[in-house]
Each structure stands twice: as structure tokens, then as C-alpha cells.
Image: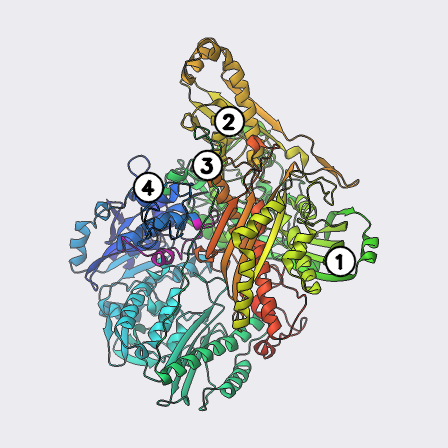
Amino acid sequence: LVYCQYSQNVFSIINSVQITEKNAEPEKTLLTYLRRNLGLTGTKLGCAEGGCGACTVMVSKYHPHQNQIIHYAVNACLAPLCSLHHCAVTTVEGIGSVASKLHPVQERIAKAHGSQCGFCTPGIVMSMYALLRNNPQPSMHDIQEAFQGNLCRCTGYRPILEGYRTFAKDGGCCGGKGQSNGCCLTNGHTQEHKLYDQSEFMPLDPTQEIIFPPELMSLSKQPQRELRFAGERVLWIQPCSLEELLELKATYPNAKLVVGNTEVGIEMKFKNLLYPVILAPAYIPELNIIQNTQDGIQVGASVTLTVLGDVLRAAVKKLPAHQTEVFKAVLEQLRWFAGQQIRNVAAVGGNIMTASPISDLNPVFMAASCKLTVMSKGEKRVLEMDGKFFPGYRKTILKPEEILMSIEIPYTRKGQYFSAFKQSPRKEDDIAIVTCGMNVFFKEQSNIVQSIRISYGGMAPVTVLATATCNSQWNEELLEEACTSLAEEMSLSPSAPGGMVTYRRTLTISLFYKFFLNVQHKLSLDLRKEVVLPKTLTLTLFLCLQAVPPGHNSDDVVGQPIMHLSALKQATGEAIYCDDIPCYENELHLALVTSTKAHALIKLVENNALPGVVAFISAKDIPGSNMTGPVVYDETVFADDKVTCVGHIVGAFVADTQAHAQRAAKAVKISYEELQPVIVTIQDAIANKSFYQPVRSIERGDVAQGFKDSDHILHGKMHIGGQEQFYLETNCTLAVPRGEDGEMELFVSTQSASKTQALVAKALGVPANRVVCRVKRMGGGFGGKESRSTILSTVVARPVRCMLDRDEDMLVTGGRHPFFGHYKVGYMNNGRVMALEVRLYSNAGNSLDLSLSILERALFHMDNSYNIPNIRGTGYMCKTNLPSNSAFRGFGGPQGMMIAESWMSDMALSCGLPAEEVRRMNMYKEGDFTPFNQRLDQFTIDRCWEECMQLSDFNKRKDAVEQYNRQHRWTKRGLSIIPTKFGISFTAVFLNQAGALVLVYSDGSVLLTHGGTEMGQGLHTKMVQVASKTLGIPCSKIHITETSTNTVPNTSPTAASASSDLNGMAIYNACQTLLQRLQPYKDQNPKGCWEDWVKAAYFNRVNLSANGFYKTPDLGYDFETNSGRPFNYFSYGVAVSEVEIDCLTGSHKNLHTSIVMDVGKSLNPALDIGQVEGGFMQGLGLFTLEELRYSPDGYLYTRGPGMYKIPAFGDIPIELKVSLLRDAPNEKAIFSSKAVGEPPLFLAASVFYAIKDAITAARAESNLTGPFRLDSPATPERIRNACEDKFTKLCPPADPGTFIPWAVQV
């Protein structure tokens, strides 16, 4: 009853429309409201945890404490609807549309080819838009900072930055066309690319932007009233004065105070916590103060991190340098603190009170002895942030009724030095592994230490203060002593949560050593009174492209850099994805119930009646067959009585809203009887002999004789971690029963429409002709939607929608196969390979899926580009209790080639010869035969190699690297050149077929359908180009709506890079048929146009629809006889990369990459370069960043962008050059083109081996030489542990077997 009296309305303005929401639900986010209540589907759901930026919108409000209107980007997936009272919200639809007028921000990303699948595009557009609203002439640095909270999985980021560089005051083209000396062209700043013309871009006119609504302005200036919203489970109260807040906190001592909802929102969603009362103190004046005191700057607890950053930056500019040491340290931490969207709403007080053990700021505040003012009804006290402030995990010493009012960040004095460090897997928007604040105070004008305070995060369940004290001189002796005492004091149990124990212990010492060097440097300068200017690395994105070959006929659309056909719609949010389809009348939502045990029998499933739930569906409700699988039926739709992995689908809830379905799924209780053994890793499988059949092998030459003839034999091992596809759009299905004859229409985000149709029909127990599967477009696929697209068709006779949340998708769908390789290689003194024996083990998971084809492809690529006269490769598929691993761009090829490059680099280190010479010497030549006896024709890798050496200026670069390494002890550079050869075709012969249907309407317009699906790779765009060239009509007359099983039947999945080849030929075939039928009318009326001929044919009753078909000729390979052609042709490429590693922390910077790729005669250079860069960046993630972490019981820890790091904007090489090989036509594919999807991914191995080269230089400083094992990915942890030195010796790892690790290498 108490709840009812207070209900009020949220009044806000969304895209200039007034919205009043009565009785707002406190648990509803802005994103759900926009998409479901208002039908504004341009804003996307990518992760629901504020980590990917797909849901970015701009919020504008009048801020009474700053007395100005502020515009800022926020994550709509975290922003509670209740918090937007009196705010204006602008979404991507609100700034422009294809139908009315585009905004320059939308136009430029599309025309610069910065939108591939387009799912992340609206978020990136809104981040840029919010930046321009605040700063119409940003610097390139501002632009990169604005994108820290946005991820893209397709483009590799370069075209986005390149397109938006045109807004920057320091980055755009100066418009001088190279005539004067000051022109950007003559200074080589950007090279004229022919991929798009900047002069066509609309200018940005800040006066045309939507103004802040005056009615909100006047409402905001009136005295505020308390807001109360009572929801199903939560009461939300927004008090308007400090007294009210303290009164409420006394009444509800356990209430959470929420400003940005960036922590509580995540806890309620992912940790299943419930906070029945939430207090929102964002607008209370006392909590928003910012004032200078005698000792420092006092900042209110509700002040956001963005505002804090602005205040501190202003102070650093204004005050003398010795006073602002702590401010600079806080700013350094804020720079890498989450993304811009989170910093814009997250409050300083929230960061302190969350009491996270890995907080980025708490160690700084603790080391600086910041003072906190806390208050409760009737009491106010000031606390110092010291070692006692955090008594336990996520606890502070505040009483339940107290609130944090403000924090005082102190000035520093002369002779005081302060530094902060944060080490994380990825530089931007990442959770720390270890953070620290270090504070030292010297006696006046001396180097004698008076006091020292060091605080660490990530070394215990709380932020800790190191207690070691000393007062001696700042010298090597102090360093030795401090390191020894830190090694003892900062110990961690070998099974500590978070893992990486040796690395974390080493970091505490390494970071102190960095501080020691910093202070030593500053001390000597201060005692000598010198000034140093900081140096910064700027991002220059060079790109020399041979886009369109000279002399190309401009009427010929094939070979032109045409923009992706949906790019403009994607940039305005008008492109429709599966979950954007408007809700059907009485539609239901489905949520999965998954197993929490890796190997167990299901004893009992208890589900209580919850609001909104319609049904619980399990194996017994399936009308047809419960058995399913892409190749063999060894999986179940729902687990029958046994689960074989964590994440095994047990059943599903169907409810009236997604929130209700998910709540029911979380509340369900399952009793298990656990089974043994639980096999998680490849090593477990080898020990238990748990393999799928068959074991595959390829052998050529006499291996035993080859080893006899060799001068040396080398053995080695390497493990390659798995990878999550991380398509921005998670798996989504909308099933609409048609109500008669068992018909069902499915809208699915899948690469494999026919397979989905077949499996759904099987589960429903109807023939395939009753099921239609339709795919408009996907927000990314990368192989992850080839066989794991959810086969969920329900037995409820109402439309059902299921879009997986990111954490469910990552848990359930599996990813790239982890591989373990064991090799023995025989070679001569000069580095020539004589014999190779390699055993490959892949972790297939709990079902076969596509693992056999993946293993075969790995074996087909075990030679990479090297001619090995005697070779034997054997492959095993490990059967483990993990979700089944599946297809992922490269499909086993990168893993096979990675092992090859591993023994190649070991061999070069053993011979003491330069790696690039050994690689060049062993490379194939035209006419050589592969281990599977296929002859290499039109072999262009040597040309790619020479061009890449030239493009990257390899020899000069190598000398510079060697010189750099002689001059630096704790940072090292490395350089590497890597070739790749990738076979094009499905290895399963029957899949190399495609169909097309071309319909010509009587007005001359053409509707095109083919078997391929669009997931951002531009397949539809290329197919329209092919039809346009063949029919001789402009692209504007041709349209593709979607891929569907009722137009082209029995299609192969859009995979294996072969879709343009297969579907292009099928379309060509159909168009040729039509041209033959139209020929008589052309002959009769040679001066007529296309429309005339079509009309004449129609009136003469000629069939104007044709279906086309194509199958790749002469394919087929037999493992028994090692004969036949598995591949139609090969794609080739070479890359050179240079990196710099920090030997103390293991971080690395990608300094340079040059790529030369042979794509034959490109159908569309803009799309092909997009594929090369996107593939390269995905490979960069695979080999240096992305690490899936599983517990020993097979539980996946990395279930979202918070823990799982894909490359971000800041991970692109500082200098990137991509070039397509000229004059290399390929007569085996449509219009002499070549496949381009998968081949470039492996080129990122050049970064991995450049890192290995840099580590080799670091190890040489400790007198370590010769080959060493470096597993992939080369994370900071692996890099640091491989650079052995005096600090790593202080932290020896615990012996395996003496403890249970937190995470295992699967």
C-alpha cells in the first residue's frame, strides 16, 4: 500500500517527441523501451553490459550545478528508463535517414566503407555524433577517445577512423590537391585513395543540429519533486535533497545508491542479485560539489568520471607541476577506464563504494591518502582511505545507514612523486589484472626517502596497502630490498581467482621497478632543475592501395569500389536485422535453460510458476525427432537425461516478455547426479584416449629416410587457444507458425538457411517443404552461424522470438577449435627442411559438429607455403565435455599453418640464421606439389613476398629494430614476415554447388536471389555487380531482398570463402540464359534500350525468369590414396609486422603492418580490402588478445566483452599498408577474381612472430638463446613470463599437481 501513493511519471523527449511513461518499471532499460515500446530498432543490443557500444545513444540535459546543457553518449543497455526524467534522448533515427536527409556522420562512415555487417554502426555513429555536438572540430585524439567504448568485429576499424578523420581539425584533407608545399598530399600525410571521393561528402553544419527542447529547460529550472516508481520487484526512489536521501537510507539501510547503473545493472543481470530498493542521488547538490580546499580538490560522490577528468585536467594546466602529481595519476587511470559511455555516467563515489578488488582508482586514492566525507542522519565524519578502509571482499567500513558524500584528492608537495599503473589484457576499455598507486616523499632537496606508500589492486580480495617501510637513499640497494619484501608480502595462492598468479606476482615487482626508474629520472632532473617534454605516439593510418587498376573502363561495374549496398541504411538504423522485425500480435519470448554441470545425469527439473510464463519446453515436448547435428545426428535439441557440457540446453521457457522468460530460466532448479570423468582439456582427452573417429593422416615422401639425411632434428610443441566468433548480433530466431498443414516460417540469423530448414523440419516431424527459412542479413557470422544457429522451433501455436543474450551465446555456441601441435623436424645446416612429422590434436567438444572437416583443412595447411620433401601429418579430434566447437573464419587452416610457422621459427633460431632467409629458401615454386599431391599453378606468393619486402622497407626497418634493441633494455622491438597459402573450396565435395534465380519484370527491373547470405562481407553487393556486368544494365535496376529456402533450394552454407565464386557463377549462368532469350529482340531493335527489349519479349510471351546453377569442376580427394584435387585454387598473401614489447609488463604495441594480398582481379577492391583488414584484425585477436578461460570443471568464465577482449580501435597497427597484387587474374573463378574472406586472417601471425622476435631480444639480455615455446595467444602474461629476468626469479610458479588452478588451457 505504501508504494501506491508515490507513483509518478517519467517525462522525457526522444528524438524531439514528448514521451510520458506512467508507472515506469525500474528494471526496464532505455534500450528495451526504445526497441519494444517505441519501435526504434536502430539502437542495437550487443552485450547488455556496456562493453560493445552497439546501444549508444546521446542524452542531453540541463545540469543545474554546471549551469549548462550537456550532451553525452550513454549505453542504452544500462541506462534505467527511470533515470531519464527531464532528459532529451537522441537515437540514430533522430539525426537523419535515407528517406529524408542523411547526417554527415552517417554519410561518411558509409561512403568510407566503414560499415560491413552494420550492427555496430549505429552505436559508432552516435558516439561520433555526441563528440561533434560537444566539439565540432575535434582532434584525431578526441575521435579515438570517443570510440574507446565501441567495438566492431568486421572492419578492422581503419575505414571508420579514415572516414571520420575528415571531421578532425588535424586529420582531414586540406583540399589543396597537392599544388602547394603545405598540402597534405605533398607531405605524404594521406595518399589519395580511389576507394571514395572525400570531396563528395556533405559539410558538417553545427547550426543545423536539433536544439535542446525549451520545455525541458524550463522544467529543469523549477524546484524538483521526489520521484518514486514501484515495479514488479524493485522500488526506485529519486530524492531531491540530502535530508531526504539520509532519511531514506536510515529507513532502507540496505538500499543501493545508483547513479550510472554501470555496476548494479550488471550485478542484477548477470549475477542474479536483486536489490528491492534503489536510491538515485544523481541530482543532489551536495553530492555534486567540486571545490578547491587548502589541501586539494573536493569532489562530490555523484560527480561522473568524465567531469572529474575535466576538473583535474584544468587543475593540471593551471597549477605548478609539483602540486598535481596525484591528479596526473588519476587522469592516467581515467584514460583507460572503461569506455567514454561508461565514464559519462559512472560516479566517483560508486567506484569507491563498489569496493572492487581490481578497481582502477581505489589504489590511487589509497596511496594518496585521500580523505572521504561520509554522512548519516545526524552524523558526519571524515575517514582517511587507508589499509583498513576495505575490511573484506566488496565491503567498506561505512555503516549501512551512511552514505559517501565526497572525496578530497590531495595536492602533492615538492619532493613528492606519485605514479599509477594499470596492466590489463587490452589497453583500452579493459578490466585490470593488477593496478597500483605509488607515492614516495623525500627529505628536502635530497634523495633520502622520508615515507613511501604503495597500494595494489588485483592482489587480494580487497585493495591492499604494502606495509614495507624504509628510510634510505633511492638507489639499487633500496630497490633490491623493496623487491624482495614485495615478493614476500604480495603472495597469492596458486589457485587464486583470476588465475595468472605468477604473472600477477611478477607485475607487483615489475611495476615498482618502473616507478623506481620514473622517480630516479625525475629526481635527477629536479635536483638539476631540468624540464622534459612528454612524447606521444600519434596514430597515422597510411594506406597505399592499388584500388582500381589504371585503364579500367569506368562503365564496367566489376572492379569498381562500389559502396556496400546497405551501408547507408545501416548507418541510419533503417537496416532490419532479425530482432528488429516488429512484434507479432500475441508473440512470445523464449529463454534457454542450460546445464551448470559438465557431465551429469539430470535427476529433476523444478520450475515454479512465475509471472508471465506460458510454458516450459523440454525433450518430451518435441513433436518430431530430438536428435540433431549438422553432419551426423549426435546432438539433441534438448538434453534427454544426460548433459555433457556446461551450457548444454536442457529446456526453454516461453513467456510474454523476454525479461519474464529469462527470470524463469534463472529461477529453475535442476538436481544432477555427477558423472566421471570430466574431460575438459586436450591433455585430459589424450590421457583418457577420448577421441572421435576417424583419425586422419597425410603422408608424402620417405619420412624415416628424410630424418636420416638431416643434419639436425628438432622437437617442439605449441598450443593454440580457441576463439569466440563475437559477431555483434547474437543468434536470433523468430518462428511464426502458419497454422495449417504444419507450416512454419522462420526468420533466422544464420549462414546456413537450408540446414536450418532441414533440422527444424526434422524436429517438428514435417517434410522440409512445410518450413520456410528467411535470412535478410546478419550482424556478423564468421562461421559461428554456420552450424550452431539455434534450432529452436517451439510447440506453442503462437509466434515465438528468441534472441540470445551475449553471455548465453558465448556459453552455448562454442567457437574456434583449440589445437595442440607436436612436431619433429629434420633440417640441414643451411636451414633447408628435409623431413617433418606433425601430430595435431583439436578440442572438438561434446559433439562432432564440423570438426572432421576442420581437422582435414588443418592437415591440408600443415605445410603453409613451404616445400617439405618428406612429410607426415596425423590429426586427432578430442571428445571433451565442452560445448561443441565449430566453424570460424579459416576453419582449421590458421591452426595448421601456425604450427608450421612455429617449427620454422624454432629452426631459424637453432641455425642462427635470419628467419626471413630460412622462410624464403624453403618456399614453394611454381609447379611444385603439395603434401596432398596437388600441383601449384599460377603461384604468386614469390611476387607477394618481393612486393611486401619493398612496401614495408624490410631491410631498413630491420636495421632500425636492431639499433633500437641495442639502446633499450626494458623495451624491445621485433620484426617478422609471414606468407600464407589458403586452399579455396569446401573439402566436402557435394557442397561446391550453388543456385540462383533471376526474375526480370516487365518494367525492366530485375530481382535477384541466390543461395548465399549477407553477413557484412558484401556478397549481395558483389552479386549485383556480376549481374549488372553480365546483363549490361546499371546496378540501380537490380535488387536483392533476402535469401530464402523457397526461392533457391538446397543451398550450401555461406562459408569457405567460396560464396562469390559459386553464387557468382550461378548468377552468370542464369543471366546468360536470359540474354539468349532476349537476343532476337536486341537484333530487331539494336538502337533500343533494356526496357524496350524486355517489353518486346514479354508481349511475345517469352519466359523472363531463369534459374542458374554451378558446380565447381574436377574436385575430389581421397585420403586413402592421397590423390585428387581438394582445392580449386589457392589464395596467397604476405605480411610484415613490427611490434614493440614492454619487457616489464608484457604489453605490446603494433607499430607497423604491410600486407600484399593476391585476390586475382578484384570484383570490388573496397570490399576486398575491407575483408583483408577485417580478417587481419580478427587474426590479431586470435594470436595476441583473445583468451577463452575455462575452470577445471569446464565452466566458461569469459562470457562477454568485460572478460573476453576482442581487438579495439587502439589495437590497429600505428602504420598500416594494404596492397592488392596487380595483374594476377585467376581463370578458375568468376571474372578472374579470387576468394578473400578467410585467407588474410592468418597474416596476423606476422604480429605473433614479431612479438616472439622481440622476446628473443629480451631473453638475450639474460643470456638465454635458442628456441623457446610461446603458446598462442601471446597475451601480456605469456610475453612477460617469457622475458625471464631477475624479477621473474623472485616469483617462481607453484609445481603443477600441487594445487587446483583457477583456469586451465583447453
Sooner in the amino-acid sequence: mark 3 or mark 2: 2
Dots 4 and 3: beta carbons under 8 Å? Answer: no
- Residue under label 4, please give it: 199
Q: Judging from the image, what secondary structure is the residue with disc 4 in?
A: helix
Sooner in the amino-acid sequence: mark 4 or mark 3: 4
Q: CA distance from mark 1 to mark 2?
A: 69 Å
Instruction: Name above or below for residue 692 compared with residue 906.
Output: above
Amino acid at pointer 3 = Pro
Q: CA distance from mark 4 to mark 3?
A: 48 Å
Q: Position of residue 321 (x, y in %)?
A: 31, 77
Which dot, 2 or 4, sits closer to the camera?
Answer: 4
- Residue under label 2, please give it: 740
Amino acid at pointer 1 = Tyr
Q: Judging from the image, what secondary structure is the residue with disc 1 in?
A: strand
**Residue 799's mark?**
3
Q: Nearer the viewer, residue 587 or 452?
A: 452
Q: CA distance from mark 3 to mark 2?
A: 14 Å
